[in-house]
Amino acid sequence: MTAPVPYRVVAHPADTPDTATIVLQPVRTALPPFTPGQFAMVYAFGVGDIPLSVSGIDGHRLTHTVRAVGAVSGALHGVRPGLTVGVRGPFGTGWELPEAAGRDLLVVAGGIGLAPLRPLVLAALAEPERYGRLNVLIGARAPGELLYPDEPWQAAARVLATVDRPDPAWTGEVGVVTTLIDRAAFDPPRTTAFICGPEPMIRATADDLVHRGVDPDRIRVSLERTMHCGTGHCGHCQLGPLLLCRDGPVVSWTRAEPLLMVREL
Amino acid sequence: MTVVRHGFLGALTPAHRDRLLAFAHEASFPGGTRIFEEGGTADRFWIVRSGLVALDVHVPGRRAAVVETLGQGELLGWSWLFEPYRWHLGAQCRDDVTAYEFDAELVRVVYDEDPAFGLALTHCVAQVIARRLKATRTRLLDLYGPPGSGGGTP
């Protein structure tokens, strides 16, 4: 297991009450380049480390979006510019966006699952001539929990959002994210889909897309288990025959579907 | 009349779709219009062509709680098919809405006269109800609530 490389926090915008985005810059040596979909083990000194997908890649700078739900994520949520954290990576498989060249792109995110998809959307928007239509479908618990609402790409891409619990000011859609698929413009046989969110949401979305004619090999999903070593040695992230830190987190629906149907796997 | 091929109509065979659309007339509602009220008589139903309709539940002493929105191609109203033909929810336009509107009583008469058509329509409405039930159960899980770790993938 490699040692964490020091990165300094250079920005820390708050996204929602319990979610923050931290932008990291290498103190000295940078890690090898990350691709969208990969993750890093981010270490809060004195507390521990957790796996965090990259939610932005800008040269040697890494962006992570962290939700405060435990000791380590709480510590990382609380870091401020100037502080140093440790980073290991890059780990795992990416979304492999270039393989979708010439095809419609359908991005479906649930909750904080939008974070790993953000760099993919930005990469697709940076090369609009390379891809077909880009649709981004987002599901969230409540309007205040939608991530990155003010970022310019939300206006540049066709973004549709729905929430489970609307507040009185919300004038958008209410319901599960799969209902938005009807509103998206895409040609199923010529579409590559990218899905991240809670696994029941992934399953429902992928099933719907397959039913509409999207090739299961062209549906990429990001799975979550307890990543620890990041190198496929400790076995914490095992999902059947897969070690998700090495063979995932992004896998095709063809590989994921049978595994997600196994109880308590 | 331009026909939406996905959504509710897309689930019917062409023959049954044409049969149903023979009873349709085009309707439009400005944003904010209340199309029906919870408990009211379910004497019509709609298939949304454009715009968004919010379904809501009356909560005494509070603003009506929106529980779902329906958009293009979706069936607005299924209470017309089952006794006592009363709306379970209220419906209000989020924005300007156009829809195919159907006289429920007329469709029910044809439904009884043509069992094959009636069965097909019942199947389609049942699919809508099942899908909404599944969606409701999924939302009960509060999937977007606090998970066991921070971060999106991992």
Image: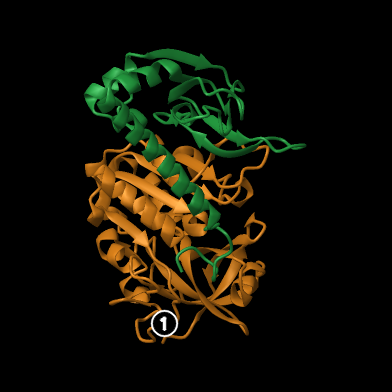
The amino acid sitting under disc 1 is His
Q: Colour of chain A?
A: orange
**Is there any visible trace of residue A83 in the rendered image?**
no
User: Residue drawn at (24%, 44%), measured in percent from left and top?
Assistant: A213
Give residue A93's quadrant in the image.
Answer: bottom left
Give residue A199's quadrant in the image.
Answer: bottom left
Relative image position of residue A139 (x, y in whole percent): 50, 48
Residue closest to the eye, A39 or B76: B76
* Horizontal arrangement in the rendering, residue B55 relative to residue A55 (left or right): right
- Is residue A189 shown above or below B90? below
* Horizontal arrangement in the rendering, residue A84 relative to residue A200 (left or right): right
Relative image position of residue B94 (x, y in whole percent): 57, 28
Residue closest to the eye, A220 or B132: B132
- Residue highlighted by disc 1: A236
Chain of the residue under the numbered disc 1 shown in the image: A
Q: Colour of chain B?
A: green
Quadrant where the N terminus of chain A sits is bottom left
Residue closest to the eye, B50 or A44: B50
Q: How is the image coloured?
A: by chain
Relative image position of residue A39 (x, y in whole percent): 43, 69
Element type at marker 1?
loop
- Taking the view exactly as shown, the residue that stands out farthest to the right is B61
User: Residue drawn at (25%, 61%), measured in percent from left and top?
Assistant: A254
**Is there any visible trace of residue B97 in the rendered image?**
yes
Quadrant where the C terminus of chain A sits is bottom left
Give residue B67's quadrant in the image.
Answer: top right
Relative image position of residue A55 (x, y in whole percent): 48, 60
User: Residue drawn at (60%, 65%), measured in percent from left and top?
Assistant: A10
Q: Residues within 10 Å of mark 1 (few under 14, many from 20)?
A: some
User: Residue drawn at (28%, 29%), measured in percent from left and top?
Assistant: B12
- Is residue A115 shown above or below A73? above
